[in-house]
Amino acid sequence: MPSKRACDCCRVRKIKCNGERPCKACARISLQCTYLKVPQKTGPKRPKNTTLNNIKALQGQLDPQWQGGLGSVASRADVATTPFPGELSLVPTTPAFEYSYQRVPLSSLRPYLELFREKLQPIWLLVTIHDLDRWIAADTVDQETYVLLTALSAATITRLQLGDGRDGGRMAARQMALECQRARHSFNYLGLANEYSIAVSFFLHIYFANADRGGATGPMYLREAISFAHMMNLHVESTYAAYPEPVADHLRTVYFLLLVTERGHCLHHVHLRIPLMLDPTIPLPDAQRVSTPLVGPGFVGLLALFLFLDREICYHLRRDPRLSIPRDALLTIHRRLQAHPLPSRLVTKVQQVDIVVTLFWMQILFWQIALADQLSLSLTLPIEVTQRLLTVRDSYGFDPHTFELHGTTMERKLTLIGDALADVIICSPFAHNSTQQVCHWKELLRGLARIVFDMREFDSDLRLKFRHKLSLALGATQMTKRLSFTQELNSDTPSSSTDHEDPDPDAVDEDFELGGLVGPTTTTF
């Protein structure tokens, strides 16, 4: 039976909707037709709190014995408190509520939970496999769990780019995020510091970091998650003595996941100059006791990389736009990164990719900073790093899907490595000669570019800039947007008009932004 209200797509487009599922307007242009927006309740609105207080004051003056009224019954959500730690599974602290609006059915959330369990749980360890299985099998959930599941679904849709078409996926993710925010404000969530609070804020950070790149909403939600962790005193070791060992291990993992996320965000967004809030003030989690098998060693290995960045390093990164860092600290980090081992083959492929690319990305990042400070490091380091990355990719058997599971952060890391190698080729005095050495460098750059362009596109502006840098380094003055980039990279026939000529900036598409050709000045965070 057709719905009496317009679907979400027609409501946004402000066109007539026939109420079918899917409606004709959505089916015609292949949009995902949903009815997630909750209709506003008709009738008189509830009086404001000031009005209620005035009424109560007047009634008290007229009858001193009167103590009733709407304001006399406290909301159960307002008095909910964090439970004493006990069970391993997450136990919601908010009681059951009766709500007049219509929730997103669990049947609509369940596919996203299953995808998260299969693909993303080893990356985001805030929820355990045990809890995911329990929620997938449940017929109903309480309000706090519902808020968490909608946030998790929004992050999953955005990271995996799900939906019928790119716009359809964005709309579905946006509706989930809006529903999460609306449902979250139905109780006093700011007064509840627990695992749920941290997880919801974290997943909203993931969603907005992908949907609103460069905006302030994503960082704000990350700060909110960190604040909840501080309210739980997760930065104090004595806190964990009150919890059973499995729960304490999981909370320790959550704390360090926030630490890794914050430091990664600091490196990617130096221009925001946000101070670090988390320090490794507690012992690292035991790799053998992380809640998911085979994930623990990989997570601890990734954590070891980010612990190279102490508060002093991040302070200098934020303070000086030219990324001035004490030379001794730079040399120490460079030596540690060079000596850092590759991940064990026993951990999951998803974590292996994350550790490998993060390691090589950090080597290039601090190499660029060292060049800006005129430290004497090898100018061919990007060549060596790219060679190692391609070798490890083949040795470990990484496929494109394994790379793209890490979303836009993986895209940024790989393009930064590619930019550095392209700068070396461009600045080389032999860049436009067909020497065997330069041909080898260009083939390495093509191999890295294939990894990037075999992934789904997460940041179109970043891809355009990378295409332009490749066109300068590989000898092409213009790259046709409609041509398959993989075919172009695989072409063995170089452009005859550019083999021995400098690229003409005027021939490059106007959408590209020309930057400096020296590595440190082209770094984009």
Image (tube, rainbow, N blue to C red):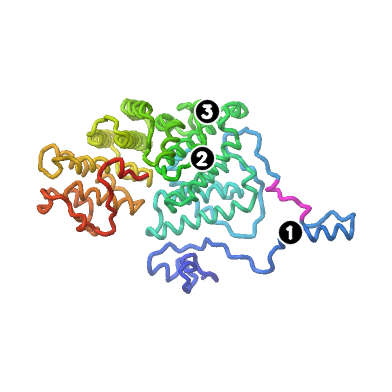
Highlighted magenta segment, given as a residue range: 71-78
Q: Judging from the image, what secondary structure is the residue with disc 1 in?
A: helix
74 with respect to 163 (left or right): right
Q: Percent position (x, y) of residue 292?
A: 46, 34
Frontmost residue, 486 versus 514: 514
Specify the label residue 127 is tagged with.
2
Q: Which three-letter amino acid code belongs to the residue tagged 1? A: Thr
Q: Which three-letter amino acid code belongs to the residue tagged 2? A: Val
Specify the label residue 50 is tagged with.
1
Give the mark, 2 or 3, whose residue is nearer the N terminus: 2
Q: Percent position (x, y) of residue 491?
A: 15, 50
Give the mark, 1 or 3, whose residue is nearer the N terminus: 1
**Whether residue 134 is visible:** no
Q: Main secondary structure of the magenta part?
A: loop
Q: Is residue 303 above or below residue 7?
A: above
Whole-number angstrom distance, CA of label 1 to CA of label 2: 41 Å
Within-10-Å neighbours for mark 1: few <14, some 14–19, many 20+: few
- Residue under numbered circle 3: 281
Q: Percent position (x, y) of residue 426?
A: 20, 44
Q: Which three-letter amino acid code belongs to the residue tagged 3? A: Thr
Q: Judging from the image, what secondary structure is the residue with disc 2 in?
A: loop
Residue drawn at point x = 53 percent, y = 27 percent? 282
Q: Judging from the image, what secondary structure is the residue with disc 3 in?
A: loop
